[in-house]
Image: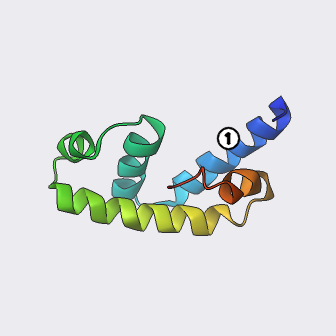
Amino acid sequence: YEPLEVSEALHCTYEVLGRLPADERLAFALRHIDGMELTAVAAACGVSLATIKRRLTRAQRSFVRMAADHDALAPWLERGELGR
């Protein structure tokens, strides 16, 4: 990817993340941006593993749905690299 494409995709990613509820955004960021294991995400958020799994499921669905509105994120969505 060209630097401008990556920059635009990053901007769109932050915009989409900003639209998620705070608890879902935190879970999503810890898991998909920081790469933390599920148990570590649950511990960091102070909730059970089951709760963090539910939050991540909601966050991932919402993220992919909202990301689809941004052309700059299309290449990543097509390859399944966002919110999976």
**Residue 25 location, x and y as percent?**
42, 52
Question: How is this picture coloured?
Answer: rainbow
Asked if residue 21 lies left or right of residue 37, the reply is: right
Q: Disc 1 on helix, strand or loop?
A: helix
Neighbour class for label 1 at 10 Å: few (<14), some, many (≥20)? some
As drawn, the residue found furthest toward the top would be 3
Image quadrant for the N terminus? top right
Q: Residue at x 47, y 60 (%)?
A: 20
Asked where in the image residue 32 lies, by quadrant, the reply is top left
Quadrant of the rendered structure where residue 51 is? bottom left
Q: Amino acid at mark 1?
A: Leu
Q: Is residue 63 above or below residue 30?
A: below
Point 50% across, 55% down: residue: 84
Task: Residue at 75%, 52% (x, y): give it.
Answer: 75
**Residue 11 at x, y percent in the picture:** 69, 43
Q: In the picture provided, is 32 more to the left or to the right than 66? A: left
Name the spot of residue 27 as percent of width and height, x first: 35, 50
In the picture of the structure, the residue carrying the numbered disc 1 is: 10
Front-most of 15 and 30? 30
Q: Where does the image place residue 3, in percent across and percent down from the top left?
A: 81, 30
